[in-house]
């Protein structure tokens, strides 16, 4: 005969039937449970239990044909190690990532051929305009920063991205509480009801981009999202005219972890939203199984500007498809102090005047 | 920057000067020698300090007596301080059906009336008495006549708050000195048309210091929020940890949704009830009306 053992949902201790109260009772924390509830819950958890499976088919890209390769040349930056591809009619002199001189390599070194490319929709003029707009209204921006920028050095770069698609089946177990406050006689009463919340279901993710360039800051690349991948077209070397393309140096296998983190967090958030009636919700288990996972290799359009100010490097990027401009700006400490103390002064005097007004009105 | 700091300090100083000007409490500012301090109908030449409980060193009694006389003569009122050795109910059996605080308050009123009777009705109509009953550790401050408008129930609570630490430490001479100081502040407030009654209390330097600190803290919080907001405008780069933009619309399918009630906990916290001291009006045995308050110390 199988010995059935239940664990206390409260403290994880082994619970047993208590004949005095006619319920299951934890000998460690004294919490009582209905036998039927425990049984039903145990069955539901057993039915839904799956193991995590966050594996993807990471086959992406294809081999270059001779025709493709003949229209392109490769350059290498000796400073940052970038391997950059231009069309054969372009003469390049500086690295779009670090600004240092680059040299042409012996032949075309392109790695895999992208599955698709999203062509630039916005030109250099739009990028320069977006940069100037990015600097507008930033009161703590050092005035000389604007003057010392070499905005003309903004470059159009096709950055390698791995694009992930997948369906996700998930089982979630949360611990939820519903809290009620009320008064009883001369007491303030807080009643907390504890629940085990089980959710399972599925959802699909499409076109999650993860950049495949070691040189590009991951946060910067995340920030220029989203891209409309539906506008992607088959790669032609002609798209490189006037631009350059970076070769991936982070493999799809290495990029999977970033995609998984995002899938896991969004899946959990979607299921959490179905239990909004709870005051608090704590995740106890989060099992996700991916299926139909596939990876594609894409070149996505970005305008990049590198600049150095006060010995620190600042990189700005504009989504060449949507025009979204991102990039952290430096803070002028002198302006920071000026605005802080002037506001403290005004705030202090204003709160003093406010106090007097309220005092005169008899409120204070 | 130095100019900014100077401006800031000047503004704070101005705020303090403006503030204290509206709520001046010092009689000395007006002390030109021609000021009439009298607010009552006149003081009487009586004994003002009674220490039957023996709480004060003998050497200090005459000093206290003199201070009370000076205060009384200055404002034309009669101020009496009495420390009882016995419970009020030991003096008057009619008190026994009421609580200790009420008894001490009533005894203070009757004490003033008995003094008046003893001096053939010559005691001022405007008087103030501070009584301690050492036996049951109760206190009472009662005012009569015009002083009912200078010291009411809220004033007596305030005055007691200023002296209670001295009483707790059995520093009775200090407590009497503090009482005299507070009485003068309240008389002066009434004289200058700024009576500290109905919950309004004298402002002390500490109160202003605290108030200014609060204003500066508010200013600092506002300042930090403002520059924090400005600084956040400089940041537009952040790692994305979710993929909500990439969920295929309509793909979310909730297959199973089950909630199991486990248990409940109930916590009860007794509401704090504020311990208020006794207050309201009393009448002495002679029918004289008194206002004030009392309590335990």
Image (cartoon, rainbow, N blue to C red):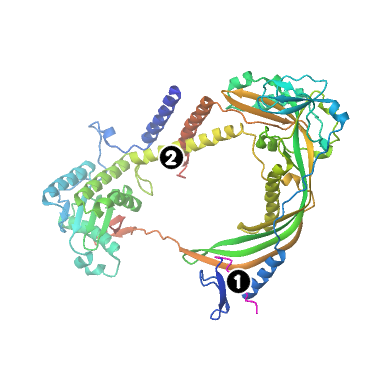
Residue at label 1?
Answer: A6
Q: Would you call the spot at circle 2 few (<14 residues within 10 Å), some (14-19), or many (20 or more)?
A: some
Task: Say few, some or many: other residues with alpha carbon within 10 Å of mark 1 (under 14 / 14 to 19 / 20 or more).
Answer: some
Q: Nearer the viewer, mark 1 or mark 2?
A: 1
Front in this rendered view, residue B205 or A278: A278
Q: CA distance from mark 1 to mark 2?
A: 56 Å
**Please, which residue is most extreme toward the front here?**
A106
The magenta span reads: A1-11
Going by the picture, which residue comes out furthest to the bottom? A19
Could you say which quadrant of the image residue B73 lies in? top left
| In the image, residue B162 lies in the stretch drawn in magenta | no
Residue A318 locus on image (x, y percent): 72, 30
Q: Is residue B110 left or right of residue B242?
A: left
Identify the residue at image location x=49%, y=34%.
Answer: A347
Q: Nearer the viewer, residue A264 or A31?
A: A264
Left or right of A334 on screen, residue A112: right
Tag shown at residue A160:
none
SS at badge 2: helix
Q: Which residue is nearer to you in this view: A100 or B55?
A: A100
Q: Does the rendering let one see residue B144?
A: no
What's the mark number on residue B214?
Answer: 2
Judging from the image, what secondary structure is the residue with disc 1 in?
Answer: strand
Q: Chain of mark 1?
A: A
Q: Nearer the viewer, residue A126 or A260?
A: A260
Report the chain holding disc 2: B
* Residue A10 painted magenta: yes
């Amino acid at each position: 005969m199988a010995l059935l053992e239940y664990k206390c949902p409260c403290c994880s201790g082994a619970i047993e039937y208590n004949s005095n109260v006619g319920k299951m009772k934890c000998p460690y924390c004294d919490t009582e449970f209905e036998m039927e509830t425990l049984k039903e819950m145990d069955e539901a958890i057993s039915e839904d239990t799956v193991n995590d499976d966050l594996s993807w088919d990471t086959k992406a890209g294809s081999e270059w044909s001779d025709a493709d390769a003949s229209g392109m040349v490769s350059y290498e930056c000796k400073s940052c190690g970038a391997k950059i591809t231009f069309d054969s009619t372009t003469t390049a002199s500086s690295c779009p990532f670090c600004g240092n001189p680059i040299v042409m390599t012996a032949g075309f070194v392109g790695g895999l051929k992208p599955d698709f490319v999203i062509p630039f929709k916005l030109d250099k003029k739009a990028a320069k305009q977006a940069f100037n707009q990015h600097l507008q209204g930033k009161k703590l921006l050092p005035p000389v920063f604007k003057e010392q920028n070499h905005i003309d050095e903004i470059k159009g770069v096709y950055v390698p991205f791995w694009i992930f698609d997948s369906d996700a089946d998930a089982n979630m177990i949360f611990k939820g509480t519903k809290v009620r406050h009320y008064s009883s006689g001369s007491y303030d009463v807080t009643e907390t009801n504890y629940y085990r919340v089980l959710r399972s279901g599925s959802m699909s993710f499409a076109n999650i981009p993860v950049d495949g360039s070691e040189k590009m800051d991951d946060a910067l690349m995340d920030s220029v999202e989203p891209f409309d991948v539906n506008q992607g077209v088959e790669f032609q070397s002609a798209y490189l005219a006037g631009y350059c393309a970076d070769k991936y140096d982070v493999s799809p296998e290495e990029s999977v972890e970033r995609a998984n983190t995002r899938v896991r967090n969004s899946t959990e958030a979607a299921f959490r939203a179905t239990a909004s009636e709870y005051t608090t919700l704590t995740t106890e288990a989060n099992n996700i199984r991916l299926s139909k996972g596939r990876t594609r290799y894409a070149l996505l359009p970005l305008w990049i500007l590198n600049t150095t100010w006060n010995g620190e490097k600042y990189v700005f990027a504009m989504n060449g498809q949507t025009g979204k401009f991102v990039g952290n700006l430096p803070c002028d400490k002198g302006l920071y102090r000026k605005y802080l103390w002037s506001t403290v002064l005004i705030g202090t005097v204003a709160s003093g005047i406010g106090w007097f007004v309220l005092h005169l009105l008899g409120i204070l | 920057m130095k100019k900014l700091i100077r401006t800031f300090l000047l503004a704070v100083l101005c705020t303090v000067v403006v503030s204290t000007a509206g709520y001046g409490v010092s009689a000395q500012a007006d002390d030109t020698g021609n000021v009439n301090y009298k607010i009552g109908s006149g003081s009487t030449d009586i004994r003002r300090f009674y220490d039957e409980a023996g709480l004060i060193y003998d050497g200090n009694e005459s000093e206290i007596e003199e201070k009370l006389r000076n205060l009384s003569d200055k404002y034309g009122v009669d101020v009496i301080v009495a420390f009882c050795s016995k419970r009020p109910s030991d003096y008057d059996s009619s008190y026994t059906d009421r609580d200790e605080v009420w008894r001490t308050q009533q005894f203070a009123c009757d004490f003033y009336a008995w003094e008046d009777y003893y001096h053939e009705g010559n005691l001022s109509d405007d008087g103030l008495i501070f009584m301690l009953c050492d036996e049951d550790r109760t206190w009472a401050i009662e005012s009569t006549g015009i002083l009912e408008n200078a010291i009411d129930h809220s004033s007596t609570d305030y005055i007691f708050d200023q002296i209670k630490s001295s009483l707790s430490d059995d520093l009775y001479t200090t407590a009497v000195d503090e009482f005299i100081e507070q009485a003068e502040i309240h008389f002066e407030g009434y004289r200058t048309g700024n009576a500290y009654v109905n919950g309004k209390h004298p402002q002390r330097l500490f109160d202003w210091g605290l108030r200014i600190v609060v204003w500066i803290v508010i200013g600092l919080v506002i300042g930090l929020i403002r520059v924090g907001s400005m600084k956040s405008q400089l940041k537009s780069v952040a790692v994305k940890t979710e993929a909500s933009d990439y969920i295929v619309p309509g793909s979310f399918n909730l297959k199973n949704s089950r909630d199991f009630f486990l248990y409940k906990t109930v916590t009860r916290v007794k509401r704090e009830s504020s311990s208020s001291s006794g207050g309201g009006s009393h009448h002495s045995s002679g029918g004289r009306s008194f206002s004030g308050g009392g309590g335990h110390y």
